[in-house]
Image (spheres, rainbow, N blue to C red):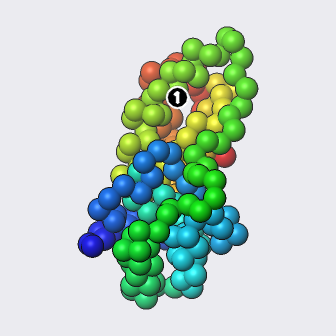
Amino acid sequence: MFIQTEPTPNPATLKFLPGRPVMPEGVADFRDAESAERSPLAQALFEVDGVTGVFYGADFISVTKGAGDWAHLKPAILAAIMDHYTANAPLFTAEGPDSALPEGDVSAEDAEIVATIKELIETRVRPAVAQDGGDITFQSYDKGRVYLHMRGACSGCPSSTLTLKHGIENMLRHYVPEVEEVVPV
């Protein structure tokens, strides 16, 4: 088995590609070892000293570090991923992915705006940020403000504000004139 690694715009996060599907549907985000209890792979990754976050995408695993140098962490992370896949272990032992976050209520007058925003995020934004090892999902829309939830490599990334303000916000304003601002949650 060959596992590729790719840098992400977030210097604290690396993207690991095991060459097979990771999450056939949805995503999973683990911000600490306690939240990883239902995933043997995430548990193993949190056992690597310095790992502070694990994110599963369709065909990748993003790992975020706190302290430590990638040169020292990477071999242990690769070993944990390799051991998991060669043992054919399940990705989850309990309930499945946490891909669905609760969304805010949508008024009838905003339903069309929200549908357009969601479609743009699904078709244009999410595929682009997945290439960088992260995910962005719609949270809510209120009086011209779009609230987005950032996960994986996007969470805590130094360039995420630039991506939100100059990329996503400008695109949404272009297609949905009612959008005034994009806010991370």
Occupied quadrant, residue 82: bottom left
> Residue at (54%, 77%) from the top-left corner?
44
Question: On the rendered image, what quadrant is the N terminus found in?
Answer: bottom left
From the viewer's perspective, is 23 left or right of 3? Answer: right
Residue annotated with mark 1: 118
> Residue at (44%, 84%) from the top-left corner?
76
Percent of width and height locating residue 101: 65, 42
From the viewer's perspective, is 9 left or right of 55? Answer: left
Percent of width and height locating residue 15: 39, 65
Q: Which of the two residues, 155 or 52, is positioned nearer the viewer here?
A: 52
> Residue at (50%, 62%) from the top-left corner?
91
From the viewer's perspective, is 21 left or right of 10? Answer: left
Q: Which of the two residues, 28 or 109, is positioned nearer the viewer here?
A: 28
Occupied quadrant, residue 178: top right
Is residue 40 among what the camera can see?
Answer: yes
Q: Which of the two residues, 68 or 57, is positioned nearer the viewer here?
A: 57
Task: Say above or below: 28 vs 125.
Answer: below
- Amino acid marked by disc 1: Lys
Q: Residues within 10 Å of mark 1 (few under 14, many from 20)?
A: some
Element assignment for label 1: helix
